[in-house]
Image: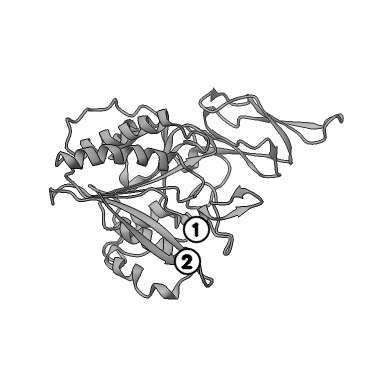
Amino acid sequence: MDVSEIIIPGDTPGTEWRLPVLRFKGRDPNAPKIYIQAALHAGELPGTALLHFLCEQLRRAEDQDGILGGITIVPQANPIGAAQSHFGDLQGRFDLGSRTNFNRDFPLISIADRATLIEELDDYPATDRLKRQLLHMALGSDLVLDLHCDDESLQYAYVDEAFWPEAADLAAALDMEAVLLSDGESSAFEEAVGFAWKYEVPGERRSMLPGKLSVTVELRGKRDVDPALAKRDAEGLWRFLAARGIVSDEPVAPAAFAGPAVPLDNVEIIRAPEGGAVLFHRAIGERVVEGERLATIITRPGQVDGSIDLQAPQDGLILTRTSDRLVRRRGDLMKIVCARPSKTSREAGTLES
């Protein structure tokens, strides 16, 4: 395993950021190459734990000449966000300087222009340098996995329609309980990767990308960081690598992916009409029917008519839930995966900022 660091100069004198990169050299030039990163939102650590245990397996395989395809791993992809705290609370989702989500505003380029990502880097602030170098590394591979997590959540993934159903093997290997089929219209990391491949010939869009894969994996919730889950997920990812011919092992065919795979339009986002204390009546993983009570918001404690009940807009599977119990007006409470499109309009791109 080769360990190197990318040094990102800070935007003020005397500061810099170090980005460790782990590489395993493949012995088969025809095998797929894979790039895996975790913790782009610095406080989302299930992926970092997964990669720690996966690297143990990869080092053993390397000792036995079992690495077939090149593997690049960035287990903590956002040292800038990891250093941002406000009164003791980690603030790893948004850059405090620009107020931009660390998983937005990746450059949308053709793969033909990959080299330009790391040209004249001194012209860019640290966060943009980080994004450009992450995207440059990813575009050197055939398969790209961006490991995130939600708040309270089942295991699921965002998969561009261009990679489905080919990506069903990954969903099965990681025991995902749902797949959300995205439209590839945002500037998030995995969609910027897909954009570069789709526009390999500038101005000409490819709708299908056989042999390629760029996915955002949501590894349950923020608090689901423990050795048993991490080892189980590492085993699942190992099975995926073996099935795709990246590592040498007896391929074990996983059970077919049995969860729902729906467009983003089929996700109901339950939002708080007013702020207050939220009391949930249903939990993640439960199936609900239209009209069923999901939550109560206590808006004026102790007063007559001091609470609001929220009902399910249609039948579905509760995919995520906020861990906050004091919620703001229009704050997201739940995501529910449904068989029919939501009546609520959605902007092109991802579900949330």
The dot on residue 304 is none
- Classify 10 Å Cα crowding around label 1: few (below 14), some (14-19), many (20 and above): many
**Would you say 313 lies left or right of 26 here?**
right
Residue type (three-letter) at the residue carrying disc 1:
Ile
Q: How many marks?
A: 2
Residue farthest to the front, as pictured: 14
Where is residue 110 shown, x and y percent of the image?
31, 64
Q: Which residue is mark 1?
A: 80
Q: Give the mark nearest the N terminus, 1 or 2.
A: 1
**Disc 2 secondary structure class:** helix
Which of the pair 1/263 is nearer the observer? 1
**Would you say 37 lies left or right of 249 here?**
right
Does residue 82 appear in the picture of this structure? yes
Q: Residue at x 17, y 49 (%)?
A: 26
Where is residue 79 shown, x and y percent of the image?
47, 55
Where is residue 86 shown, x and y percent of the image?
64, 53
**Disc 1 secondary structure class:** helix
Q: Which residue is mark 2?
A: 126
Residue type (three-letter) at the residue carrying disc 2:
Ala
Q: Residue at x 25, y 40 (%)?
A: 58
Which of the pair 136/295 is nearer the observer? 136
Whether residues under marks 1 and 2 lie with C-beta atoms below 8 angstroms apart, the answer is yes
Quadrant in which residue 139 is drawn: bottom left
Q: CA distance from mark 1 to mark 2?
A: 8 Å
Where is residue 247 shown, x and y percent of the image?
20, 40
- Classify 10 Å Cα crowding around label 2: few (below 14), some (14-19), many (20 and above): some
The color scheme shown is one colour
Does residue 209 appear in the picture of this structure? no
270 vs 107: above or below: above
211 vs 220: above or below: below
